[in-house]
Image: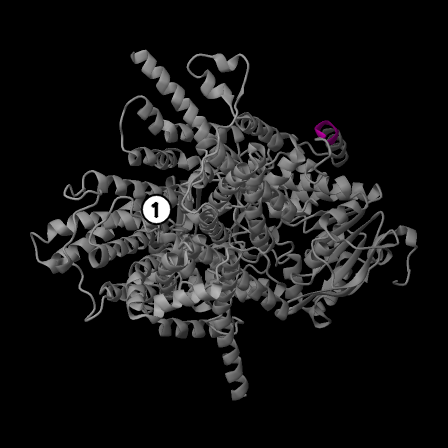
Amino acid sequence: MLQADLSSRGMSALKAVSRVLLPILLALAVGGLLLMVFDKDPFAYYGYVVKRGLLSPSGLEASITRSVPLLLIAAGLIVAFRAGLWNLGVDGQFLLAAVTVAAFAPAAVSVMPVWAAILLSALLAFAVAAAWSVIPAFLKASYGINEIISTLMMSFLGVSVANVLVKIPFNDPSTTVPQTATLAVADRLPPLGGSTISSGIIIALVAVVAVHLMMERTALGLRLQIVGSNPKAALHAGLNVRALTFIAFALSAGFAGLGGAVDILGVHGTVRADWNPAYGILVIPLVFLARFNGFAVIGFVFFFAVLMIGGESAARRLGVPHFFVLFLVSLLMIFLALVEFLESRRAERAEA
Amino acid sequence: MAGLLTEVFIGSLFYGAITAGIPLLLAGLGEQMSEKSGVLNIGIEGMLLLGAYFGFLGAYSSDSFALGFLAGGLAGMAAAAVMVALCVYASMNQIVVGIAITLGAEGLTALLHHFHFSRSYPRLPRAESLGIPGLSDLPVVGSALFDRNPLVYLAVLLTFFMVWLYRRSHIGLNLQAAGDKPAALDAAGVSVTRTRTLSVLTTGFLAGLGGAYMSTIGAGLFLPFMTGGAGFIAIVLAMLARGHPTWVMIGAFLFGSSLSLTTAMQVAGVNIPTDVIQMLPFALVILVLIAFGRNSYLPPALGLPYHRGSR
Amino acid sequence: MAPATDSEAETAVSLDGITKRFPGVVANDSISLRFRRCEIHALLGENGAGKSTLISILAGMLQPDEGAIHVDGARVRIASPRAALQLGIGTVYQHVLLIPSLTVIENLLLGSPWWKPYAREETLRRYNELSALLSIAIDPDVQVGRLSLGQQQQIEIVRALWHGERVLVLDEPTSMLTPQGVRELGAVIKRLRDHGVSVVFITHKLAEAYALADRVSVLRLGRVVGELAPERLKALSEAEVIDEVVTMMFGQQAGQDSELEETLLGEAAGQTLRRTVDRERGPALAVRSLSTLGERGECPISEVSFEVWPGEILGVAGVDGNGQKHLAEALAGQRPAAAGDIRLAGESLAGLGVPRRRERGVRYITDERLGEGTAQLHSVATNLVIKEIGKPPFWSGPLTLWRAIHEHARAEIAAHDVRTPSERTPLGKLSGGNIQKVLLARELKGESRLVIFNKPTYGLDLQSTRLARRRIREIAEQKEAAVVVISTELDELMETCHRILVMEGGRVAGIVDNRPGAEAEIGRLMTGSEAA
């Protein structure tokens, strides 16, 4: 009896692992085939990626630092997706907040203590990004307009606005390329003791765990979940769907903005014209892969950061452009969905 | 002098509006068909991009624009086939698959371009245009509107063909029914799966064709990520057009003009940063949504997979 | 082949040993039936007896796991709805299957092969012929979404006959109709039978089957448990037929259970109504000139006024889609009122949302149990507190006390006899009757002063129906609450209510005391044939 129970638990754990590992392996395999088409050795490529992204100390530190903005964006997406909202406008929210902070922080450190400047910058970034989500939230709540379209449009608009801000009002005239003033290294978020890892990682981890607990353990989280799973039931239960829509959008965008702020305060110190890392659309599949679970998100984001850092090195060394990572993510999403579909179909058959 | 400036300005504005508008029109008509049948095709941006690359590659390697168009259309259709398999047959989430297709197309076309052309961006020769006798000699707008690539006229004719298709054909009825109440279409003896398959494949072909026009005729070259969100604008057009192909056409040329405004202004000697101009179409969409969003319409069954007899 | 008890020539379609399994149930268990030309064949059975599955198989929507189907003696496979239509089997489904955004004529054109010319004129001619045969008069160029449900059903019959000249299958066709509509439908069906069509008529209402059918078959738990041939049906009196059918449906004991029979027949009208309402006190609920605004495809209410006294059950009758939904939602606080006032014990509810009204004792049991009543993916426990999120004792400040929620759920599950594996089971996995129990448990918790039931027994099996109706009476009697019961089943209202309000086109057509003979008056009011 006990043994049967144990083995069934073992089975389900195995299933959970295979549901995650299988799509990853399939994506890597098909990606490898494409590499072979271009006469590149997939094993050499993947081996190099792991070596440079995970196994070398500097690579590992870079991967952890790269995880920071991705994790903060993921925290926001968890809120949005669980509330049933497709916030695809992360890039605009991220970049506008980053530019605002890049302009504000160097000016602020001259009139207030560094910790206050950093704190104010973070709040400002959150607010700017949240404000950028007000229009999609309004369109969704008032006219029922699909937020996919409106957030994408606001994102494109936001990226352009950010560029104009960098080039005209926030431009630092002392540099040749258009860019904002630079925050002195001493005034940035300090690296973790003795390493190059941004201390933003602490902020990011706290944010993801906090969001996870909020969704699971608070009234607001349950309200958002119900709006997400059945908006009509939410109306019937007397939830203020309108307000909840605005809240979910604001939180989602706000965390993306915080990601932009921490990236500037911890790593870059400035925004150059036409800089757009376009993290948003890359994080979406990771959040799906983790099934909106905060702890799983941490694992997947780190995996992906390794891929990115390793892939960037590989681009220089092996001549495989880092666009390859985009293609891998796309394969990952498709195989993830496919494995889930086959799984549910098998479950149906087994029941019948 | 002022008169001449205005003339040049208007001429180049119209010319650019058509150049930028045709891909939007083709993709918008395609997206409209998908949405009518109940499939929200977010992957259309990727289909445009694939069409742009393969259209360019086809025209570049065969020296024939017609073959380029065909290659672009087929590339878009191939991506649509993936969407059909995953969304129509396997009932997966259309948004997830759509994002995956767009991302994959971005990565794939950039990679392919890198491996084929490395860092060079070869240009195609200028395509022959087809002047419409009489009209092409009109002052100011004649050559901008009536001395264009044959695909331009075909796209406009296609719009009116779609009007007929939706109002006076069995295919039109089937498409409408598949998006409105698929179970009823099924009960009437028409396969929902087949109807949606047909419409999504057509969407892919049209979007691919639009992409091919963008790279071969519009720009004369291929640049990675060159579609820059045109597919998403096409989705908005389809959403706001509420099933009317002619509204898609009007919208496509309106957006086309806002995209061509930069060039026109530079021609007219006005200098504005390109970023400001680039904002225009997106800002316009948002303004349009705020002003007319109340009236946007999507079919009730949009985004929902259909299973016969599911309990 | 099944033994030929009747001449083969008479048989239009025969089913032999049809079996269909779904996860966890055998919906059809070796069913053999024979549908004959010039005969109206009623299939009786309660919800879950397997009627709908059988129809889906006949219509080509589902494939049987075992068994054979013969049409005119030839074995066939009905692989798709198209195949069914080609075999001359037309089906009118319980839920209208027309495309609302297309016109009548476009709906009839639907299904022609795509390469065929768009034969509007020809279709129109045939439509006029069939309209004449069925004596209906509906503009063929009007959008179906603008027609009443009864008219839509008439179009469905036209469409079913378009191809289904051999067999016409009607699934619960009377559920959307007024009493007059039911009579008209009966006449149409008989006319078709006389033209040689084999009519299969599915119903759970005994009286209807008796009035219309030439032959009755009874289904129970997926099996055919009995049949009354035409000769026998003619020989017996109505009471004898009913006795016999009830015995088939529920077994020997049930044959003597008078309450069951009453529920089945809806004949308990008036008799079981117990206490009279004390109207000396003021009304518990007073609604004054209440109006709402309608969106696309909805019927708003206008100038609705009525009162309900403590302990009184007010029925709301009317053909579906005549403003009942808006009335319920406006009372519950789910939909803003455009004008008018609602007073509960003299206190105005104007401007209060669902949570505040709930605090004041307003309860609403919706008809869309899965659509809006519950969040199916969430657990039974969560669904039980879904209207109290953020309030003690289940929340402390913002924090969710899951232990308290689960404890509460276990208690409610026991108290209301909800059959569920656990309180953590997703609600969507429960049966319809159990979902209704969860809803009742949630809504009837605490002090209730106004309870609104919307189609409380829709889709429930007989036992659950009885339980639900008993609960309605108990609430009025024991809790002294004002109760509003909205239903399209007149029988149900006659059984449970003191007075019946009739809605037509969003207005109150009249309020009728529940006394013998009230049905006729209600029927007149429903069709708006009496000047208000």
Corner quadrant of residue A190: bottom left
Task: Name the residue located 34 percent from the left edge and 35 percent from the top edge.
Answer: B278
Viewer-proximal residue among B90 and C109: B90
Corner quadrant of residue A46: bottom left
Label 1: state its secondary structure: helix
Position above or below: A260 against A143: below
Q: Which residues are magenta?
A: C119-123
Q: Is residue A249 magenta?
A: no
| Mark 1 crowdedness (10 Å alpha carbons): few <14, some 14-19, many ≥20 | many
Left or right position of A284 against A4: left
Q: Is residue C142 visible?
A: no
Q: Which residue is mark 1?
A: A137
Q: Is residue B122 visible?
A: yes
Left or right position of B177 against C297: right
Viewer-proximal residue among C45 and B171: B171
Viewer-proximal residue among C405 and B86: B86
Left or right position of B185 against A219: right
Residue A237, x across and y down, in percent = 40, 56
The rendered magenta stretch, by its main secondary structure, is classed as helix
Q: Type of residue at label 1?
A: Ala
Task: Name the residue located 60 percent from the left edge and 45 percent from the top edge.
Answer: B196
Position above or below: C233 against C321: below
